[in-house]
Image (cartoon, grey):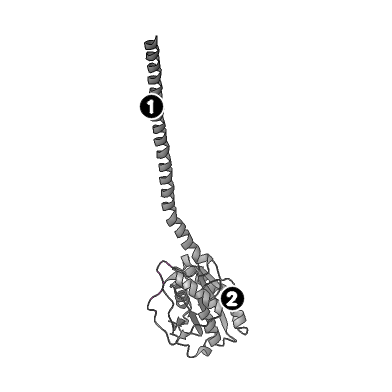
Amino acid sequence: MKKLLSIIMVGILMSSLAGCGRNEADGGRDAAANGNTISQESAGIGETDSESVPENRAAESDQQEPESGMTEQSTAGPESGAAVESEAEPGAKGGSALVVYFSWSGNTENVANAIVDQTGADVFEIVPEEAYVDDYNALLDIAGEEKENGTRPAIAGSIDDIAQYDIIYVGYPNWWSDMPMILYTFFDSYDLSGKTIAPFCTSGGSGLSDTVNSIKELEPDADVLEGLHIGSSSASDPENAVSDWLNRLGLAE
């Protein structure tokens, strides 16, 4: 009987051990499977983030132009080595009109050149005595500080005889929903009473903002006409927009 009981107990014990072994093996496979799933999900999140970061940065870059106010930006980058013009240069046809403009990226310059081509006006580029930085983000900060402090950046060169002009086209980019402060330097420097002022502006999406009214306040005795806005994406080919604007104003040649 004792031997029989011993054999039975040994059989029960071996059966229990085998069952435990199977349970541990299944648990190991489950743990491995769960571990792989977590690992794959983590890898997926990482891939999504790595792909979306450039897109987000591109979107922020695009928004800077219309939203932050610094809106004259082109893929060509800022102008480098712009020539300082000490006096107005005669246009092809001469006449009693003058195009005055400030351009950082070249967009406003393109529009200014189109006006000169279509009107024969003389031209004067507003060039700061101290050149602005080439980096757009750094320029944002500088322009914001100038606006906040009411800075009047100095202009290199001057217009010898502005009295000879009856019509002044004034061009600028839209910075922080305003003219760059160097335009305020220009209006402080010259009395445009009795003259006709035709403003034109480039921006990524902010339009003219309230700049036309600002010019009216700065030059209350001048006749300030409807302004022209051209988006930065269209500034490389502004001829048709300029032609339509000049026709509306009755200034087309």
Q: Residue 79: say if magenta.
A: yes
Count of all numbered marks drawn on residues in the image: 2
Q: Taking the image as drawn, is residue 188 in sight? A: yes
Tell which circle, 1 or 2, labels the residue nearer the N-terminal end.
1
Horizontal side of 13 relative to 162 (left or right) equals left
Name the amino acid, label 1: Gly
What kind of secondary structure does the magenta stretch mostly adopt?
loop
Q: Which residue is mark 1?
A: 21
Question: Observer-nearest residue: 42 or 3?
Answer: 3
Quarter assignment of residue 249: bottom right
Q: Residues within 10 Å of mark 2 (few under 14, many from 20)?
A: many
Which residue is drawn at the image coordinates 55% and 84% (left, top)? 187
Position in image of residue 88 (x %, y %) = 45, 86
- 111 up-or-down from 124: above or below: above
Please state the extent of the stretch shown in magenta in the rendering: 74-82
Horizontal side of 80 relative to 65 (left or right) equals left
Q: Residue 26: say if magenta.
A: no
Horizontal side of 98 relative to 24 (left or right) equals right
Name the amino acid, label 2: Val
- 233 up-or-down from 217: above or below: above
**The label number, if any, that marks residue 212 in the structure image:** 2
Which residue is drawn at the image coordinates 60% and 82% (left, top)? 218
